[in-house]
Image: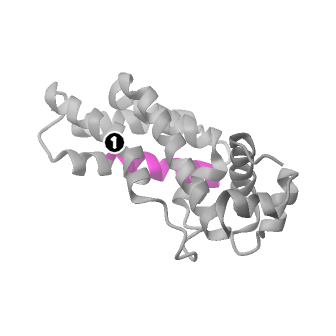
Amino acid sequence: MVHNDSLRQQLLSVTAELVDRDGPARVTLRDVASAAGTSTTAVYSLFGGKSQLLTAVVDDGFRSFGDSQRAAATGGLRGVGVAYRVWALEHRALYRLMFGGALAAYVDCQPSPEVAAGSMEPLMEAVAAAHTEGALRPAPVEMVAFAIWGQVHGLMSLELAQVGPPDADWAAAYSSALDAVARGWAA
């Protein structure tokens, strides 16, 4: 059997869903292989083992997230902010794995620092561009970026966990938060 990129992506996707649903301790490589319609040999051949598979899932998530942020960067801060929510809603399981702490018990399963940091570059660049344009008050780029990230991340985490009123209009709340961020940092 050929272990191609299509199978690799399928295994990453299946793993994210299984780990999100069952937790990392309960998911076995046999479960992943079965759900993907392949063999455990394929999983070992492509990833090496469970720790490497989980790391690959998280790294793949950060790459995908970073790609969506780069694609939205032409829209400035609001563009990357909107793209953050769109990506999180389209990749709920990955978002929870990347940011929810489910993998914290796996010491050998940490995102590659360069991949995780690279996914935040579009936000840093949007903040730097807004500073250059005079749209933001003077402050260190990294501090502004992390403050903005914290705002949108917190709201997305609440939305995905459905923590709020049963009739919450999450899209309106998110848009209001982006407006508040813009006003809060405006020059």
Q: Quadrant of residue 103?
A: bottom right
Q: Position of residue 84 (x, y in %)?
A: 48, 39
Name the residue nearer the viewer: 118 or 141. Answer: 118
Q: Nearer the viewer, residue 7 or 133?
A: 7
* Residues rendered magenta in the picture: 148-163
Q: Residue at x 46, y 53 (%)?
A: 154
For numbered disc 1, what is the local secondary structure? Answer: helix
Dominant secondary-structure state across the stretch colored magenta: helix
Describe the colour scheme in one phrase. one colour
Disc 1 residue type?
Answer: Glu
Using the rendered view, name the quadrant where residue 185 is placed: top left
Viewed as shown, does residue 121 lie left or right of 88? left
Residue at image point 66% right, 52% down: 93
Q: Is residue 155 magenta?
A: yes
As displayed, is residue 19 above or below residue 180?
below
Judging by the rendered image, the residue that carries numbered circle 1 is 121
The answer to whether any part of residue 186 appears in the image is no
Residue 26 as seen in the image, left or right of residue 35: left
**56 versus 78 height, above or below:** below
Is 74 left, or right, of 46 in this rendering?
left
Q: Quadrant of the C terminus?
A: top left
Out of 149 and 110, give the one closest to the viewer: 110
How far across and down, in percent of the image, does residue 19 sit? 71, 62
Say few, some or many: other residues with alpha carbon within 10 Å of mark 1 (under 14 / 14 to 19 / 20 or more): some
Give percent across and percent down for residue 28: 78, 70
Task: Give the image location of residue 106, x and y in percent.
Answer: 57, 75
Res 135 visible: yes
Residue drawn at (52%, 58%) of the image: 99
